[in-house]
Amino acid sequence: MGHFALVDDNIVRNVITIDNSNLDNLPFPESEPVGQAFIATLPDLAIQVGTWWECSYNNNFRGIYPGLGYGFDGVDFIAPAQPEPEPTADDYTVQPEPEIEAP
């Protein structure tokens, strides 16, 4: 199977798979323009704004396998930054109140 990610404004908007027979059973990178031409024949996909880039499910090329919201720098896909987790009560240590002796 060939995997393609739709990138618009350097953000992944869609990810699809295409049967190898529609890619003329070619390896990457020769399969990419064939896949792009095939996608252009599919009305529901052809109207989507952006560029379809081939990606590797096994991370053999283009960095990592992208998901929705991942970035693309023109060469590799990039995982989105993970937000810092919200602190919980367990993240804070409770100090005992100091004992003050009366004079």
Image: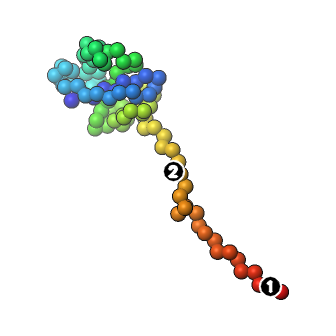
Q: Residue furthest right?
A: 103
Measuring 16% from the left and 22% from the top, which residue is drawn there? Answer: 21
Measuring 26% from the left and 15% from the top, which residue is drawn there? Answer: 42
* Residue type, mark 1 in image: Ala
Q: Is residue 87 above or below residue 41?
A: below
Disc 1 target residue: 102
Q: Earlier in the sequence, mark 2 or mark 1?
A: 2
Mark 1 nearby-residue class (10 Å; few <14, some 14–19, many ≥20): few
Can residue 30 be seen in the rendering of this structure? Answer: no
Asked where in the image residue 55 lies, by quadrant, the reply is top left
Q: Residue furthest bottom?
A: 103
Where disc 2 sits, the SS reads loop
Name the quadrant of the C terminus. bottom right
Q: Is residue 79 above or below residue 40?
A: below
Measuring 71% from the left and 80% from the top, which residue is drawn there? Answer: 99
Relative placement, left or right, of 91 versus 45 is: right
How far across and down, in percent of the image, does residue 62 sit?
36, 31
Would you say the residues marked 2 and 1 are in contact, meaning their CB atoms lie under 8 Å apart? no
Asked where in the image residue 53 lies, by quadrant, the reply is top left
Front residue of this view, candidates 89 and 11: 89
Name the quadrant of the N terminus. top left
Q: Which mark is residue 85?
A: 2
What number of labels is visible? 2
Mark 2 nearby-residue class (10 Å; few <14, some 14–19, many ≥20): few
Closer to the eye: label 2 or 1: 1
Relative placement, left or right, of 72 versus 53 is: right
Where disc 1 sits, the SS reads loop
How far across and down, in percent of the image, does residue 46 sit?
32, 15
* Residue type, mark 2 in image: Pro
Front residue of this view, candidates 27 and 58: 58
